Image (cartoon, rainbow, N blue to C red):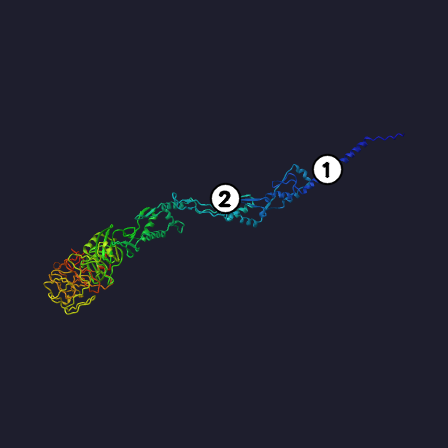
Amino acid sequence: MEEAPKKKPVSVKTVVMITAAAVVIVLAGCFGVGYYAYAREGKQYTEVFFPNTTVNGLDASNKTVEEIEKLVSADVDSYVLTIEGRGGVTEQITGAEIGLHNEFDGSLEQYLAAQDPMQWWDHREQSTAYEVTAAAVYDKDLLQARIDDLIFFSEEVARPPKDAYLSGYTEGEGFVVVPEEQGALLDKEIVRQAVFEAVENRSTRLVLEDLDAYQKPAVTSEDEALNAEAERLNRFGGIRIVYQFDDQKEVLDAYTLVGWLKEDADGRLELDRDAVTDFVAGLAERYDTVGKPKTLHTSYGTTAVIEKGTYGWQIDQEEEAAQLYDLLLRGESQTREPVYIQRANSHGDPDFGDSYVEINMITQHVFLYVDGELVTETDCVTGKVSNGNSTPEGIYPLAWKQKNRVLRGPGYASFVNFWMPFNGGVGMHDASWRSTFGGTIYKYSGSHGCVNMPYAAAQTIYEHIEAGFPVICYNQEESAESIAMAGKKPGESVPEEPGTEEPAPEETLAAEPGTEAAAPEETTEAEPETEAPAPEETTASEPGTEASVPEETAAPTPEETLAPETKTEAPAQGETSASEPGTETEAPEPGTEAAAPEETLAPEPGAEAAAPEETTVPEPGTEASVPEETTATEPETEAPAPEETTASEPETEASIPADSSAPAAENLAPETEASAPGSLPEDLSLPRPDAESDAPGGPGETG
């Protein structure tokens, strides 16, 4: 086998050179690779920020502009504004609802472009901080629409505030101040401005209470005027007024009074005057009895319903309302009676109670009861029916009373001892000119409307009654049994004095000698030329009655002739008789001489004797004059001397004419107190100064 040729040995230098070259090649390769890698790493920083870079305090290392914008806008994209209202009510507005986003100014792009990517290595230990401006942008129209739609402005939530006020009256508490309610009604403009500001500042919480946006009550529980009003009304609410009507009561307390409060123009509660007036009117409606029918249990055991008259309770509504209003304003409580225009005996039924005068104008009888006991009863004569002077029906209060009064009317002046008016000029009185009472006298020879009665009965009644005493006049037929129960016989009449005699009502008057007697119901005035016959030859007595013929008589002169022709009894010597109802008498003409003492002129047959005063019988239906208007006899008439003329004794019969067409003139004596029924005063010419001057009276006094 062949041996291989031996290789030539390599020198050290060569090895060194080869090694060095290899190292260079390796190093060059490594450098190139490293540079490439570095450059490649730096290239990314053309799009991202260097490490340790912050933008607006946020880490922006290795983040693009878009990434940094999102990072900076993160609070905007997730923005939620929470609005808090009263009562725990809240609502949120999101950024998305209003198109909220940030708009940048381009500075991020500038910062990135300014980076040298190959310098990235240097930023490993070096930090860089940038600040950029990002404006929050939103759609204002969307935000306004969202505000308008907030729940705080809905009817369910937006409750208006309520002022403090006074409660109604409560037992034990009275009137109290009810606190105000704040409500939840907002001032929308204040809220709008606050929401816009919060969004722009990207505030996340808005408390409406802090805005002072809620409307406030005008009056709070601390209001001084309101508390003063509560105090005033509590004094008013404590009032208790009790109206007493015998055993009945009307209570006026707070429960009623609070209903009488009404607001005035300023909103204050005031007492309604109309409510007070209406209350008093209600009392009058329930308790006034004037004009309401009244039931009388008569003395005959029967029942009569009295529908007319002026007697009864009557409240003075105007005065009572004024007093009650003032009482309430003063806050005073009391038990009281109303102010009355007129009072009655009882608030029960009947209101006249058990004290009254009862007059049955059919039976012509009067009863006086005091406290339920019969004090007296008597026959009477009421108004003349035939000429329309009937005594009016009804129940009336006694107006007043007076002794020794002259009742004057057209053509008559009647002296009475006891005058008791109860219905205008209609009253009760004695009638000394009458000798009989009761029966049917009232039909043909009744009064002018008054209730005539005997002296003794009139005196008793006068002494037991006062102003306001009820007088009951009614027309009711009674049976004989009923009349007997009342202590009377049917048709019974009671003479005033023993010895008197009732004349025949239908008797005609004696005519003058040689003349024809006048027909009934006619009155003929005697001619002045008529000469009276001698006293021995002529009498004027009633049938069956003996007339006293004076010892001396004289024919009357023409001035002394009296009219009309009415039969009159001639008095005895030294006596003068009072004329009777239905007769007309005249005083002597002025300038004529009064009759001499102890002399009496005998009138012609059928003529009427002269009376101390001139009277004129009024036509039926005429109104009587005021009593005070005539107080004396004719100024020129000479009256007989007091000692020469006296009234006839009770036994003297007074004739009642049956033939008279005019209403009766019941009394012609002056108003002087008489000593006995039927007597005339001593002085016929001068009335008593106290008889008529100061007494209350009125027109139309009748006899």
Residue 692 shows in this picture: no
Q: Residues within 10 Å of mark 1 (few under 14, many from 20)?
A: few
Report whether 627 appears left or right of 13.
Answer: left
* Image mark for residue 427: none
Residue assigned mark 1: 34
Please tell me whether residue 60 is drawn above or below residue 326 in the rendered image: above
Q: Between marks 2 and 1, how big is the CA–CA gap? A: 71 Å
Residue 659 in picture, x, y percent from top left: 20, 65
- Decide which of tag 2 and tag 1 comes sooner along the chain: 1
Find residue 491 and report its image quarter: bottom left
In terms of depth relative to the viewer, which is nearer, 220 or 580? 580
Give the residue type that dot 2 points to: Gly
Q: Residues within 10 Å of mark 2 (few under 14, many from 20)?
A: few
In terms of depth relative to the viewer, which is nearer, 452 or 505? 505
Q: Secondary structure at mark 2?
A: helix
Q: Secondary structure at mark 1?
A: helix
Q: Which residue does the image show at 58% across and 47% down from the upper left?
A: 97
Find residue 589 and report its image quarter: bottom left
Q: Which residue does the image show at 76% across and 35% down from the upper left?
A: 26
Quadrant for the N terminus, please: top right
Q: Are marks 2 and 1 in contact (CB under 8 Å)?
A: no
Please tell me whether residue 230 is drawn above or below residue 605 in the rendered image: above
Residue 464 in picture, x, y percent from top left: 22, 52
Give the residue type that dot 1 points to: Gly
Q: Nearer the viewer, mark 2 or mark 1?
A: 2
Residue assigned mark 2: 87
In terms of depth relative to the viewer, which is nearer, 268 or 483? 483
Report whether 385 appears left or right of 557.
Answer: right
Report whether 427 appears left or right of 174.
Answer: left
Residue 149 shows in this picture: yes
Residue 649 in picture, x, y percent from top left: 14, 58
